[in-house]
């Protein structure tokens, strides 16, 4: 969920920078996209580990 929000904020920052509506430092979109990617990877590995644990519990039960 947070990764989607950060991606949308990054896109919004790129649009604002392209239209010169506000002064935004150049590194802000990179930070937003980087955090979004990091959170997406963490969520993916968490999903895989929870699924594996659930399968082990179901097999033992």
Image (cartoon, grey):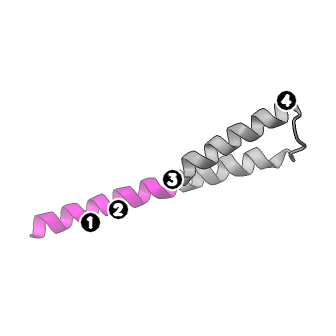
Q: CA distance from mark 4 to mark 3?
A: 31 Å
Q: CA distance from mark 3 to mark 2?
A: 12 Å
The tag earlier along the polypeptide, 1 or 4, is 4
Nearest-to-viewer mark from 1 and 4 = 4
Task: Give the left or right position of residue 9, taking residue 50 as reference.
Answer: right
Q: CA distance from mark 1 to mark 2?
A: 6 Å
Residue 19's disc is 4
Does the stretch in magenta take in 12? Answer: no
Residue 49's disc is 2
Q: Which residues are magenta?
A: 41-60
Asked if the residues shown at circle 3 and circle 1 are in contact, with their CB atoms under 8 angstroms apart, the answer is no
Asked if the residues shown at circle 1 and circle 4 are in contact, with their CB atoms under 8 angstroms apart, the answer is no
Residue labelled with disc 3: 41
Task: Give the left or right position of residue 17, taking residue 59 as reference.
Answer: right
Q: CA distance from mark 1 to mark 4?
A: 48 Å
Residue 8 coordinates in the image, percent (x, y): 63, 41
Residue 21 coordinates in the image, percent (x, y): 87, 36
Which residue is at a point 60% across and 50% down the rendered structure image? Answer: 36
Asked if the residues shown at circle 3 and circle 2 are in contact, with their CB atoms under 8 angstroms apart, the answer is no
Residue 5 coordinates in the image, percent (x, y): 59, 48
User: Considering the numbered disc 3 on the image, is that residue within a helix, a strand or a loop?
Assistant: helix
């Amino acid at each position: 969920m947070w990764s989607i929000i950060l991606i949308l904020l990054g896109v919004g920052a790129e649009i604002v920078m392209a239209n010169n509506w506000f002064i935004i430092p150049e590194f802000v979109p990179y930070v937003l996209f980087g955090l979004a990617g990091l959170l997406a990877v963490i969520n993916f590995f968490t999903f895989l580990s929870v699924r594996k644990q659930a399968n082990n519990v179901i097999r033992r039960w």
